[in-house]
Amino acid sequence: MRAALLVIMLLTAPLGAQQPEAQPPKPVDEYVPVSQLPPQDQLPAAPLLVTAYSFVWIALFGYLVSVAHRLTKVQREVERLESDISKGSRT
Amino acid sequence: MPKWFMPLAGLAGVMFAASPFVIASVRYESTMGLVQKIFYYHMPSASMFLISAVVCGIASARYLFKGSPRQDRLAYAAAELAVLFGAITLVTGPLWARKAWGVWWTWDVRLTASLMGWMVAWAYLLVRKYGGPGSDKLAAGLALFGMANVPFVYISVNYWRTIHPKTSVVPTLPADMGGALWFSFASFLLLFVLLLRLRVHLEEQRAKLDSLYLSLDE
């Protein structure tokens, strides 16, 4: 019985394989010149350039603001502690 | 903060504000066109990323062997800048590559090694923040790995078959393109020095705060 099923599967397998299927697009993993790309993949350069420059400016400015914020917070606490200590030493 | 800080901060601001105009005035590269102008920010930020990793590694080595807290503060500051400039490099690179190579990312040796270096810098910061007592020395060890990765990132394009441009591209640039690139590089270098000094100052203030808390407890 098992042998019969195996024979049927082996005989019908090539039939299934021969059925037409939609082929997935071939993955691109090596250098492809821009001119050879399909039209839907040819992105205009300006949005990429603007995104890159915007990211750089926002990242640098954001980091500067972050450091300034942390520094202000620590300096305030240092001043508060120094005044507490000086008050404590006077009493 | 030292006296030189504010005048240089003003100069860095002016240079950064002028850099898009300087870059826009340069001619287009013949094969890539407009998108190649990302290069003028990508290459200097990548250089600052590698410099940060080297500064962090050298300071960490000195901290491990000499135990100087000053070097530890410098290493911590440099690691944060490695994450910042690494992020800029790893974002601007794919934006350029999508147009120039047709892919956002490829597991090219330089790209992979750069990603590894960036992850080591992140690991350094995470160990410092959540590692508990002794994490400073553990993080310093990590920084040595980060520094060891730097020459590998730099020479990889010359030794392996890769789609990333070689290091020999920069010296062969025409005068106007080279001028804009070095102007941008100088802006990034100046900003790097200023941010490093500011970040070290933050660590100095934190150390001062810790000593004040200790004196209160006593």
Image: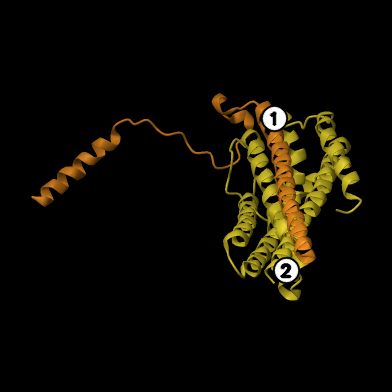
Chain colours: A orange, B yellow
In the rendering, which numbered label is found on residue A74?
none
Dot 2: within a 10 Å radius of its alpha carbon, few (fewer than 14), some, or many (20 or more) residues? few
Say if mark 2 contacts mark 1, CB within 8 Å.
Answer: no
Mark 1 falls on what kind of element?
Answer: helix
Observer-nearest of B151 and B196: B196
Residue at numbered disc 1: A50
Q: Amino acid at mark 1?
A: Val
* Residue B144 rendering spot, x and y as whole percentages: 68, 66
Mark 2 falls on what kind of element?
Answer: helix
Residue at the far bottom in the pictured view: B65
Above or below residue B93? Residue B130 is below
Q: Amino acid at mark 2?
A: Ser
Observer-nearest of B194 and A19: B194
Above or below residue B5? Residue B27 is above
Residue at image coords 77%, 60%: A87
Residue at image coords 37%, 30%: A22
A23 displayed left or right of B117:
left
Select label 2 or label 1 by which is in front.
2
Say which quadrant the C terminus of chain B sits in.
bottom right
* Residue B210 rendering spot, x and y as whole percentages: 70, 64
Q: Quadrant of residue B55?
A: bottom right
Residue at image coords 64%, 38%: B97
Residue at numbered disc 2: B215
State the CA–CA distance, disc 2 to disc 1: 52 Å
Task: Provide the chain ID for the residue under circle 1.
Answer: A
Observer-nearest of B86 and B23: B86
**Visible in this render: residue A55?**
yes
Dot 1: within a 10 Å radius of its alpha carbon, few (fewer than 14), some, or many (20 or more) residues? some
